[in-house]
Amino acid sequence: MNKYLLYPGCSMESSAKAYMESLNTILEPLEIHFEEIDDWNCCGATEYLGINLIPAYSLIARNLALAANQMNGTHTVVAPCSACYLNLAKADYYMQERPSLGVKVNEALQAGGLKYTAGTLDVRHLIDILVYDVGLEAIKAKVVHPLHGLRVAPYMGCMLPRPDYQHRWSDHEHPTELDDLLRALGADVIDYPLTTSCCGGHMTQIGPETAFELIRRLVADADDRGAVLMATVCPMCQMNIDAYQNEMNHYFGTDYHMPVLFFTQLMGLAFGSEPKDLGIGSELVSARNALATIGVEVPVTHEPAGPRKKDEGLPMPRRWTKHEGKEVVK
Amino acid sequence: MTTNGKPRFAMYWAASCGGCEIAVLNTHEKILDVDANFEVVFWPVAMDAKYKDVEAMEDGSILITLFNGGIRNDENEHIAKLLRKKSKFLVSFGSCACEGCIPGLANLSPVGEIVHTAFSTITTDNPHEIYPRVSFDVPEGELHIPKLSKILRPLDQVVDVDYYMPGCPPESHQIAAVIDLLIQVINGKAELPPKGTVIGAGHSTVCDECTRTRNVKLIKEFKRIQDIAPVDPTLCLLEQGIPCNGPATRSGCTARCPQAGAQCIGCYGPAEGVMDYGARLITAFSSVIDANEPAEIEKILDGIPDPTGQVYRFNLAGSLLKANANAFKLKE
Amino acid sequence: MSEKKQERVGVYVCHCGSNIAGIVDVVDVANWAAEKLGRQGVVIAREYKFMCSSLGQELIEKDIKELGLTRVVVAACSPHLHEKTFRIAAQNAGLNPYLVELASIREQVSWVHTDKAVATEKAKAVVSGAVSRVIENAPLEEIKVPINPNTLVVGGGIAGIQSALEIANAGFHVYLVEREPSIGGHMAQFDKTFPTLDCSACILTPRMVEAGTHPNITLLTWSEVVNVSGYVGSFHVTIKKKARFVKEDLCTGCGICEEKCPKKVIDEVFEAGLGYRKAVYTPFAQAVPNYPVMDKENCTYFLKGTCKACEKFCPTGAIDFNQQDEMINIDVGNIVLATGYDLFDARRVSNYGYGRLPNVFTSLEFERLSNAAGPTSGNIVLRDGKTTPKSVGIIHCVGSRDKNFNNYCSVICCMQGLKFAHLVHERTGATVYNFYIDMRTAYKAYDEFYQRVLEEGTLFVRGKVAEVTNAARYEREKGKLIIQVEDTLASKQRRIPVDMVILSSGLQPRRDAKEVGKMFGISCSTDGWFTEKHPKLDPVATMTEGIYIVGCAQGPKDIPSSVAQGAAASARVLDKILQKEVALEPIKASVNEELCSGCRICNGLCPFFAITFHEDRMVTEINPALCQGCGTCVAACPAGAISGTGFSNEQIIAQIDGLLLKNLEPVGD
Amino acid sequence: MTEHQFEPTIIGFTCNWCSYRAADLAGTARMKYAPNVRLIRMMCSGRLDPTFVLRALSSGADGVMITGCHPGECHYMEQNYKALRRFLLLRRVLAGMGIEPERVKLVWASAAEGAKFASETTLFVEEIRKLGPLNWGKPDDGSAAIDHGPSSIVHGQELEVPA
């Protein structure tokens, strides 16, 4: 039984309810135990750090302090939201790297009778523990309903892998954790070069047309590559691409229909849960048609490894992996 | 030059515990040879004698004086100088006289603190904070007690010393051997070693006499002996992560402690020609550490809770630095 | 401490023109030394314009003879400059050279300080330290060891081949060891060489053949050095000759086995993963030696136990499936390491998409692509094997000058990039872009080549490429590789769509450089390249006498420099061989067995294997020939049983007291 | 320099292959640095016997600067790590002797780092200047007997914990 402290973050209770619901369905089969941090507060999202550092860091550090008090048997805090994950990791890192910051923040925490020593906790994202603690093999083993033939664009988003303070990802420019996970579910994962490109973040509020262009790139490229669905790990990514796709279409006069689901929802399906228990249907750009293909037996079209079929073709170099030399799970 | 023809012998204790005396008596019947061959003129532990009697003696009239204990107060210093004057050969006898020994550890604190600790900490019932006075008026007159000096000094930091005999205390079999040698010398059957020689000990270090097996040492963790169970009875203690002072400590004790399963604590002092005992241990311990990263090295070093005490337990007063800075800095 | 006889010390303070005298009052220093250090044993103190001049040296020689000096201190420049000079002067006057001490009052005083008074005082202290030290100096004799005339050259690339040939031509025997089936190294994989564009194979293969057939060269390919012991003059080396499964004496190199072998595998080494070879193969046509090797991991017989096609068809019955690895022991006097480099693994720069985007190639892949003997017979095509690119982007500094990977410049990439640009242009007429940070073409005829490529119409964009992607944003980008880059000259962000991208990957130390270094007793820099004895004045020698480093093993360099180093090392080796014996600096550690307790604390400290422990006598011994004189064991011995010549405790303690002017206090303090 | 300013005396131990050459380079390049450091050349920082440091401090030095090749660049392969280990333990022992650990500093400087050698030297001199003189064992070596009565009562009161 893997035990962790959970920092859900605001969105998991609102815009990303579906994420939370679906997450809950996979915990038991994967023998993961989450203990929610009592009295946690908002992480300040992407904006606050841009406005006033010390209060912003203190706001984040309060959660770390609470977690540190609560850790029994585990010192790992899991955040399913990329922004939360980045903020927590960032605070932990800089409080250590810039002792003066650590001091100031702790002065602030003292007001609440709290204190946090940087480095006490391991801050990790949900997909990190799924891939590296639970393991792809264990996940594969739980798949009762492989997603064969579902052409998915794996979208990690920009906040998760960068900056990679603790070197948790296979590659901070083009991480492959999500690809590997979806592949383990049997999905037909497309090569998605924009996997770490920006979804627009809060630009949807400040400069929509900028956000629209960024969203268009993501959706258009996924569509060009024949993806019927995007899978994401980040509430903000999901919301931007889902909620602003229509406006984006209006703005550019395009007509894209690219549903975007949380990877946990796809895991839930693969593990045999009912769509309704996974919050599927709550998305604005409906995934109904895309998911219609699930369960229908279609021949696996794995990407050919090594030399191409065509004789005159030239072989491709081996794929880069986190642990150099070691082969990746196919 | 002597009243009964026999050469004169003296033994004195300054700042010491008296163990040296016991070690001498521990030579059993050998002590009779001393009496048979010498006229014991001054030996406060064994016989009654007054300083004035010694002062009355002719300079150089005592053939040999075994002086144990360090110089901690003006009385010690006075007697040291007196016995130097009166003795032909002055032997720095035992660890205290040679290098300060345990009393020398007091050099880690200023005199004030030492007195305070002795007279007003929880271990002492002294509600009125009554402290010793150098001079004190009583109806019968004025009483005096010796003045403490800032730091304890080994004998040779105060007077010229002819021979050194280390150990806490010197091993009785070594004492016996030295007594034999002396007797042979006075009977013209042997030569005295050159001035400054360390007698009653070996030239190398304890490992030389230790029978435990040794290999190339790579230490990942230092542990205190009580934290290891079981201690391998045949393997080098240092190799087991126990900071054993044997490698740097002069041989001559037949490696008693390591042989008995306890680490050497260094009472025989540095080996021949070594300038600073602690330095040798510092390099000995650090040389066996199996790590290159500062953080990892520090972690390993945490296994030696009191490094200064570890490397200078017996040698502090005799070391290059002699004492803790505060002991020097203390203003009167 | 027993009283030692009073030494007679001469102190000589050099003006070095105004270099020293300009800041330090040399007269004052000399007078002070004569007066204050008299009790130390200073009988004469002089100052002179240029001590290093012949007149200055004669001054010393004269005093040694006439005043019977037993010690000499020269207060002048750094010992690294003139220590030898004055040692020889002393020797001429009959004084052991090691009784001379240099006090550096130029590099350490006059050149670095401005206040004359303070500088003069410091100079006095430095002289005082040197005087106290020199009194403790002991006369030393150089240690002479004989030199075995045979030499080992490790690595059969161009640097190693050059080195081997030079020595062999001089008439001495060389063992040339190569890990791969054939010598030739990276150069054999190249198509053309910059800037002359002559065919790499055409200029290399004659040298390979010469090395392969030279009577003085024993060629050991498909072999690796597994153990080295001994020291300069007499190294003992164990070489593992891996089983070829081909009897070299019977094989004629006809190639039938390779032709008949049914097993095709990707050639990761010679073809840089871009082509195929058989399970039994010679890496390339002009391989030396030209008999093949069998790749056990892939051979069907070794995998399944059946096949043996090669054996059936071999006309001379040279195939031998039972061949075993063979251990060869040789004795040599000198060793030249020419172990070369590895190419930076471009997959690590994931934003350039190599390994993900088919039409992104590495420099080595392109070399094979453009090589007439390569998988496409020299046709520059995309990975589909047929389409000729219409536009090609060449990215410089991939993995070099980048703090995420390697900070250093890989030296060859600029010229390599230019060469590629020319070849692409010449053979495909495609539009070629070069993306560079700085253009570095500093060498004979290099910049001219740059000019030429410019004139050919190659486009240059100054800026570090941010990413290579196949995510099109606009119609014109569809189906292309888009290079996103900041054009720092136009201060514009550009997106340049191309068909093919070539990564001018950097050079890296061999992945096993550290272990190899350990085996030969030499060190690596933090970058991982082997460390030379002196970066400028001794670039091919190492700290370990008798071991030399040449070519890219020492650092990134091009072919001419590698060849030059190969030759340079040979000259050094020949010099040693012809001297027949070598004098070692007598700075050595030794154990006083009387004091040694056999605690074995020192046993783990020597990286040169000079320390041995005698179980029987329970004492440690130090082999003077292996000892490099670092003094670590001397400092470590808890019994004070190890002493070191040249830098003894007495010398250093005396110098400390001297520098602190303790020696001025009355004796017996 | 004002006559009030304390001028520390510092002993510097250098490695023949890197830091000593760095010092040479600083000289050749005429880089100016504080004149308070007096150098001793050894073949390697691994030669550094803690005795040397103790001797320097007890013989009147206010600080000791130990220099060697950067980790991984030792000309004797790895001996500078041995110096590092000794240094770290020595520093702990010195702390126990009431000597500020900052008085003994370890600096890595390659043969090419003349500038670093110069700046590190000046920096160290300033650090020691702040710490003030060490003058070990002065004014007397402890021979002057002291009356522990008054002084220690004062001391006792200092340490007294109010009830």
Image (cartoon, rainbow, N blue to C red):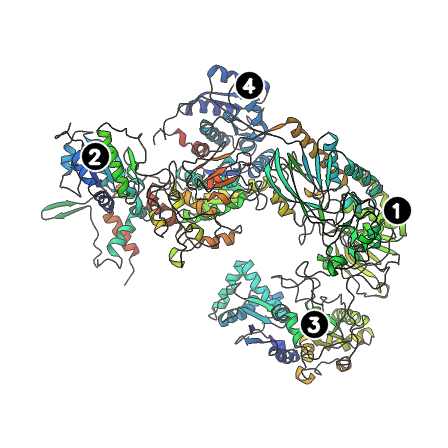
Which of the pair A238/C614 is nearer the observer? C614
**Disc 4 residue type?**
Asn
For residue C92, the mark is 4
To which residue does mark 2 refer? B82
Marks 3, 1 in one chain: no
**What secondary structure is marked by label 2?**
helix
* Residue A207 visible in the shown view: no
CA separation in Å, label 2 and label 3: 93 Å
Figure quadrant of the N terminus of chain C: top left
Callout 2: chain: B
For residue C456, the mark is 1
Of badges 2 and 3, the one in the foreground is 3
Marks 3, 4 in one chain: no
Q: Dot 2, crowdedness within 10 Å: few (<14), some or many (≥20)?
A: some
**Disc 3 residue type?**
Ala
**What secondary structure is marked by label 3?**
helix
**Disc 1 residue type?**
Glu
Q: Dot 1, crowdedness within 10 Å: few (<14), some or many (≥20)?
A: some
To which residue does mark 3 refer? A184
For residue A256, the mark is none
Residue C179 shown left or right of residue D104 in the figure: right
